[in-house]
Image: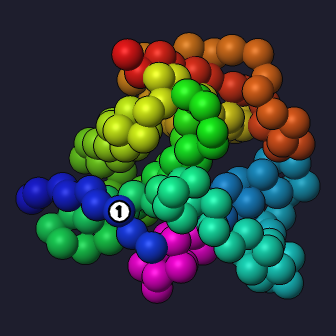
Amino acid sequence: MVWTVAPEPYDSPVAAALWRAYYTEVSDRWYLLHEGRRTAPEELEREIAAVSGADLAPPEGLLLVARYAGEPAGSAGVRLPAGTTAELTRVFLYAGMRGRGGAALLVRAAEDAARAAGATRMVLDTRGDLVEARALYARLGYTETGPHNADPYAEHWFAKELG
């Protein structure tokens, strides 16, 4: 089977489905770890609706969607603030698509998009319980750094020179 990665409007039905799946997974993982329960349905709906993804609209950002055999399988976002540092966000693959190389493909496509926009460095943050993400970033050449933001859920910050 073949992977493809292409830009996607942040407000498309495909993007909305991927955002819902991403947020549900990371939120449920946090609540299960810290409170022994899944995210309350009303909280889940409120938080999904509160973050539109508009920061991933060109020219300030970009949402990339990976498809496997033509079907949406995952996403990665790039925030492109003024300057030469871009931010990687929302790297996600549906559980059934993991282990097939799609995550690395998405991150590399995000790096290429950041370079094309003039970025020379990519930063990201993640949580301690997202061990798969931390392993992916380390494998792709990201190094752990000090904080670059004040996100209350961020526990690990990474950077990579894009050269």
- Residue toward you, 61 or 107: 61
The residue carrying mark 1 is: 7
Q: Residue at x 25, y 74 (%)?
A: 71
* Residue 73 in the image: above or below residue 30: below
**Residue drawn at 55 percent across, 28 percent down:** 84
Residue 81 lies in quadrant: top right
Mark 1: which secondary structure? strand
Residue pictured at 45% horizontal, 73% vertical: 9
Residue 105 in the image: state x and y as whole percent: 29, 42
Q: Position of residue 116 (x, y in %)?
A: 35, 38
Report if residue 84 is visible in the image: yes
The quarter of the picture where residue 109 lies is top left
**Foreground of the two, 68 or 10:** 10
Magenta segment range? 10-21
Is 108 one of the magenta-colored residues?
no
Q: Is residue 95 left or right of residue 56?
A: left
